[in-house]
Image (spheres, grey):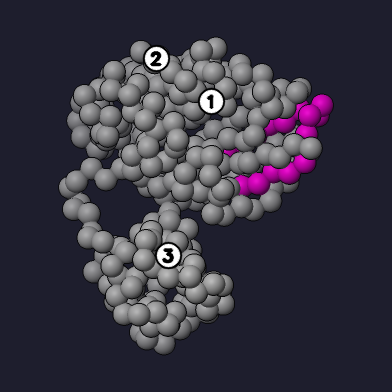
Amino acid sequence: MGVDELGDALRYGPFHRALRVAIDRRGLSLSRLRAHLARLDLAVAESTLSYWQRGMRRPEGPRAVALIRGLESVLELEPGSLTTLVGPREHPGRVSATSFTDLSPLGPTTTELLAGLLDDPARCNAGLEVALVQERVVLGSAGQQQDVTTRIVLRAGRPGVTRYLGVYHGDAEIERAIVSAGDGCRVGRVRRADRSMVFELLFDRSLDEGETAVLSYTVNDRSGTPCPGYTRMFRDGAGPYLLQVVMAAEALPSRCSRVLGTREHQPPVEAVDLFCDRALIASAFFPVTHRGVAGIALEWC
């Protein structure tokens, strides 16, 4: 591990990059790092450390500063070098969902399309909490993506919510893509540009605060190009996510991976090999999702 790389990470951030580089330099596993912190009477879950270094969650809460200072000590860093990268805590009442631009190179196009459907694109789906997402991607005989069927469980955070706004990013021109409604909704306005599509899914009635809605919809991409995989953007924390890719016997990829990342079309921060079952289905389950992207990557010979 080069000294310059660590210095650069500590100077410019972000926090998760600096933490990851510092851990690599010390050669500590997360379990060993957790044990060192425990000797300082600082309790933290190994999964939390993993989320921090992957950028999927940031240190927050009353004990965050003490934990970060403990990390600086264990990782032999200058006092305050990690603390300054975290910045101020977000106010609980403020809308804090990650912007589309932060998650995707198509973010500016998506934001522009959403501006035609609501006054403030940054507040897209702000009144809804995502409790559960299940998606099933079907590939054709040439490895092309055919259909993506999404089933989503939403909980209303305020009364009067009447719609969910969906976002889809394709791998080719989006003009041929279509969206159709399944359970619990109907398709409203649809906007397309470049490789982005946004669409309204209108509920049968407005929701009361705390009420749950279950809806499903299908996007047919019709691009005809070999599928590089499928990822879903999460602008904020969400409940469990299950993604399944159904393959055709005529076209099997050379490798399937369960991936987590901070941004679309960027190398993942975590990749784990997956295997198809007898029905040629690869499944990736994410018990909890945080800001970033999650999905399945495919490699073809």
Quadrant the N terminus occupies: bottom right
**Magenta-highlighted residues:** 242-258
Q: Residue at x 51, y 18 (%)?
A: 174
Q: Earlier in the sequence, mark 1 or mark 3?
A: 3
Does the magenta portion include 252? yes
Q: Secondary structure at mark 3?
A: helix
Q: Which residue is mark 3?
A: 9
Residue lying at 65% horizontally and 30% vertically, measured from the top left:
227
Instruction: Measure how far apart labels 1 and 3 are at the Cα level.
Output: 33 Å
Are the two marked residues, 2 and 3, in contact with CB atoms closer than 8 angstroms? no
Tell me the SS state at disc 2: strand
- Whether residue 200 is visible here, answered yes or no, is yes
Residue 139 coordinates in the image, percent (x, y): 68, 26
Q: Which residue is mark 2?
A: 190
Q: Which mark is residue 170?
A: 1
Q: Amino acid at mark 2?
A: Val
Circle 3 packing at 10 Å, graded few (<14), some (14-19), many (20+), is many
Please name the amino acid that badge 3 sits on: Ala
As drawn, 129 above or below 2: above
Which kind of residue does numbered mark 1 sit on? Gly
- Within 10 angstroms of label 2, few (less than 14), some, or many (20 or more) residues? some
- Residue 139 in view (yes/no): no
